[in-house]
Amino acid sequence: MDLVIRAERVITPEGQRPCSVGVAGGRIVAVESGTVESGAVALTGERVLELGDDEVLLPGLVDTHVHVNDPGRSEWEGFDSATRAAAAGGVTTIVDMPLNSLPPTVDVESLAVKRKAAAGRIAVDVGFWGGAVPGNLGALRPLHEAGVFGFKCFLLHSGVDEFAPLDEAELGAAMRELAGFGGLLIVHAEDADVIDRAPRPSGPRYADFLGSRPREAENTAIARVLRLARETGARVHILHLASADAVGLIAEARADGVAVTAETCPHYLSFVAEEIRDGATEFKCCPPIREAANREQLWRALGDGVIDCVVTDHSPCTPELKRFDSGDFGEAWGGVAGLQVGLPAVWTGARQRGYTLSDVATWMAQRPAEQVGLSRKGRIAVGCDADFVVFAPDEAFVVDPARLRHRNPVSAYHDRPLAGVVRSTWLRGREVAGEPFGEFLVREAGS
């Protein structure tokens, strides 16, 4: 074997146990219970890594919601900085969103531009979402055949004019088209009409911004998506769920046979509206961070399995776009940059609520991989890619944005104490240490 990792604590699909994990040709070829320390006969290889007593071996995380913004807005992030930050945070696979880059990924030609921009610059494995926008219905199947993992749409202005929202008729048409070839629609679910009726956001008060994006906007949009999914038979995924009121709608639809999954994000599980100070526009995101009671309901829905996974929705920008000069939530760009700190942020909240590292690995590695059909990612099991995180769960640190690998030092987690430090990250059996050897991933046949 090329590599053997021995640890008293390895997170496998069967739970945490002492194991020796053998790697050959970039794949896991053996997972043997027990280690030398526990009295078992251990595997051997050309290189043997013995983890310390304070370390746990996790599967590499799969983050299916990352805005790399490259090409076109690479001053916001970029493939080089994004994938280095991912690796520093234990993420070995990302799937890039189709908007905020120029051009947006709405046809095969723009997908080729995106891949060319990323070639030779990625430190982890990278896949791509396509976009569903007005006028590109005929481009969806070719994009699917080119290997994108699904199609993102908005039901209100996306924040950039070149990625327009779908109205109800266009949304239904996109679902019928995707149902015809088994494609997946992923939806930013906020209702434009509800938000148009709400007060306009302006000024530094977070309470005013929260009032401009009411829960009703999410609830109404999700209900529409589920209704059309029932009618068309399309597979749908609800992005960045922030309103816990919609959890019952999702559970009911799933019980009725609707093919629906849902995600939430570390910032919705970490922060609460009551504690966001006025002018702190680093916390602005859409949908917004809501109240403490809502956060606890999201945690319960995650534990109950109604929310399937946790991904970052890493959406960075330059400091100027956050309007720290005025602190005006109406003018600031919306998005939380959290790619590198997602794992410790979720682990910090999870351990406080009695969840385990096995739970975290399920939410942040196994289920995101399953959701996009990456059968060899997200698990420490024979046949999977040898993607690992060496994690020290009891080591604490305080987030310093200047030390993160993100392109810009802007973070809602600034000065936040977190539990859990990534000691090293391994991609297909090689430690990620600077050389960009990530690969492009495409949708697997039948997924």
Image (tube, rainbow, N blue to C red):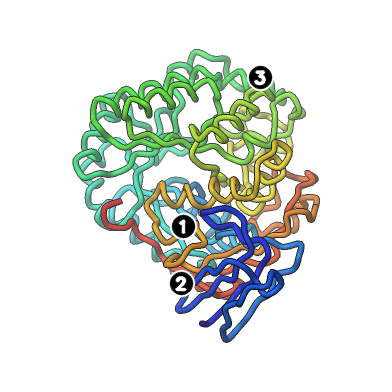
Q: Position of residue 402 (x, y in %)?
A: 75, 56
Q: Closer to the observer: label 3 or label 2?
A: 2
Q: Position of residue 407 (x, y in %)?
A: 63, 57
Q: Residues within 10 Å of mark 2 (few under 14, many from 20)?
A: many
Instruction: Pick whichever of labels 2 and 1 is earlier in the sequence.
Output: 2
Q: Residue at x 66, y 19 (%)?
A: 208
| Residue highlighted by disc 2 | 27
Q: Position of residue 198 (x, y in %)?
A: 54, 14
| Residue highlighted by disc 1 | 71
> In the displayed structure, would residue 398 be above or below residue 51?
above
Task: State the residue lying farthest toward the front.
Answer: 39
- Residue type marked 1: Pro
Instruction: Pick whichever of labels 3 and 2 is earlier in the sequence.
Output: 2
Total of numbered circles in the picture? 3
- Residue type marked 3: Asp
For this view, does 115 lie left or right of residue 424?
A: left
Front position in the image: 32 or 121: 32
- Callout 2–callout 1 Cβ contact below 8 Å: no
Based on the displayed image, in which of its 4 quarters is residue 282 positioned? top right
- Spatial distance from mark 2 to mark 1, Cα to Cα? 32 Å
Q: Residues within 10 Å of mark 1 (few under 14, many from 20)?
A: many
